[in-house]
Amino acid sequence: MSSPGRYRASGTPLAERRDYSEHAQRLFDDTGAQAVVLFTGDGIIAGRNQEASQEQAEQASAICTSLFSTALTASELFPVDGAGELPLRQVTVEDGNRFVIVAQAGSNVRVVVYTHPGADLGAVSYKIARFA
């Protein structure tokens, strides 16, 4: 029979992980966005603004995890000579007159910002970069 410690999880249990909702709310307020969701590289929600429902945040994190991974793979098809390995920083999708922006916000945290129609892409991107 094995010892109980042998099968202990090595990572932090989901219930004990840090909630970044306060940070998401701050970026939401700063950008005037429609929604802000923070999520891990494997699509687990790390935080969301108060106005976004849990279901919306889950869908956004799943879709944007895939979107970011696809963009990363696409960017690696044509490497830049002599530039070394350049990290993918941001993916921007234009939807009519609004934007969905997915950006790296830490070592294993990404952020997605859904802007309102007519938002200033440069200003929002700058605020996301400062946030990250």
Image (cartoon, rainbow, N blue to C red):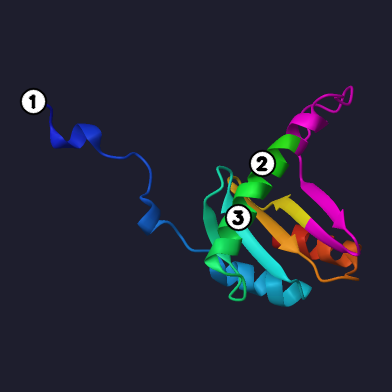
Q: Secondary structure at mark 3?
A: helix
Magenta stretch: includes residue 51? no
Marks 3/2: CA distance? Answer: 11 Å
Q: Earlier in the sequence, mark 3 or mark 1?
A: 1
What stretch of residues is rendered in magenta? 71-100
Residue bearing mark 2? 66
Report the residue at 58% width, 45% height from top. 108
Report the residue at 58% width, 66% height from top. 48
Report the residue at 53% width, 58% height from top. 46
Which of the two marks, 1 or 2, is nearer to us in this view?
A: 2
Label annotation for residue 1: 1
Identify which amino acid the numbered label 3 is placed on.
Answer: Gln
Q: Earlier in the sequence, mark 1 or mark 2?
A: 1
Q: Position of residue 18 (x, y in %)?
A: 46, 60
Residue 37 located left or right of residue 11: right
Q: Secondary structure at mark 1?
A: loop
Residue 102 in view, yes or no: yes
Q: Are marks 1 and 2 in contact (CB under 8 Å)?
A: no
Identify which amino acid the numbered label 1 is placed on.
Answer: Met
Which of the two marks, 3 or 2, is nearer to us in this view?
A: 3
Q: Secondary structure at mark 2?
A: helix
Label annotation for residue 49: none
Which of the two marks, 3 or 1, is nearer to us in this view?
A: 3
Q: Position of residue 7 (x, y in %)?
A: 24, 34
